[in-house]
Amino acid sequence: MARKIRFEATYPFLPEQVWVVLTDPVALGEWLMPNDFEPVIGHRFQFRTKPAPGFSGIVDCEVLELDPPRRLAFSWAGGGIDTVVTFDLAPHGSSTRMVMEQTGFRGPRGLMVSTILKGGWRRMIEQRVPAAVARVSNGDYHPAPDAPDARCHTDNP
């Protein structure tokens, strides 16, 4: 049976503001990891961080779903796991409800890695994401230069 990580959070920001920190590579790098993300279905990208025992520090990903500003899904493979991460955003009064899931953890290695990642995701969802969104909403953030417009839906030909 596959295991999953799931977090729900409500942020006092509009979905479009939360969407920016999920899809702009600079903002995403501020709260998650440096990356070469582009909001394009089929785009392959990597997250990079410091290596650790059993983990090269590289997470290989591919954008699987993009429905601005409601849903983002991408594959997440590295450190012996092959999973899918999804973010679902929904208006909640004057706030945004976000549900984050990482699914597909299998076997003993998946159990171990999901336990390790759960603490990191909790810190990011509860602290780092809202701090990044606050910078966006206050105008203290500037999108990546020459980055594709993260609000536009783009399909591969």
Image (cartoon, helix red, strand yellow):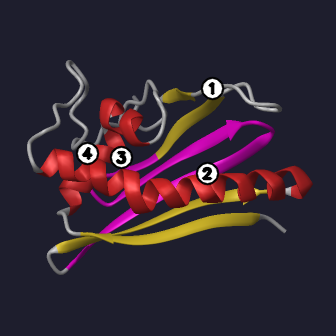
Near mark 2 (Cα within 10 A), the count class, few <14, some 14-19 or many ≥20, is: many
Near mark 1 (Cα within 10 A), the count class, few <14, some 14-19 or many ≥20, is: few
Q: Can you tell which mark lies on residue 109?
A: none
- The magenta region covers 65-92
Q: Are marks 4 and 2 in contact (CB under 8 Å)?
A: no
Q: Which residue is denoted by mark 2 in the rendering?
A: 84
Near-viewer residue (14 or 140):
140
Q: CA distance from mark 2 to mark 3?
A: 15 Å
Q: Is residue 1 above or below residue 154?
A: below
Give the structural element (helix, strand or loop) at label 4.
helix
Q: Is residue 23 above or below residue 126?
A: above
Q: Which residue is denoted by mark 1 in the rendering?
A: 50
Q: Residue at x 58, y 52 (%)?
A: 120
Q: Amino acid at mark 4?
A: Val
Q: Are marks 1 and 2 in contact (CB under 8 Å)?
A: no
Q: Check the image and name the residue furthest to the left.
A: 139
Near mark 4 (Cα within 10 A), the count class, few <14, some 14-19 or many ≥20, is: many
Q: Which residue is denoted by mark 4 in the rendering?
A: 20
Q: CA distance from mark 3 to mark 1?
A: 21 Å
Q: Which residue is denoted by mark 3 in the rendering?
A: 22
Give x and y (percent) for residue 78. 71, 35
Give the structural element (helix, strand or loop) at label 2.
strand
Q: Amino acid at mark 1?
A: Lys
Near mark 3 (Cα within 10 A), the count class, few <14, some 14-19 or many ≥20, is: many
Residue 35 showing in the rendered view: yes
Q: Is residue 75 found inside the magenta-colored segment of the image?
A: yes
Q: Amino acid at mark 2?
A: Val
Give x and y (percent) for residue 41. 43, 38
Where, quadrant-wise, is the C terminus in this rendering?
A: top left
Compared across the picture, whether 65 is left or right of 89 comes to right
Of helix, strand and loop, which mostly describes the magenta segment?
Answer: strand
Give the structural element (helix, strand or loop) at label 1.
loop
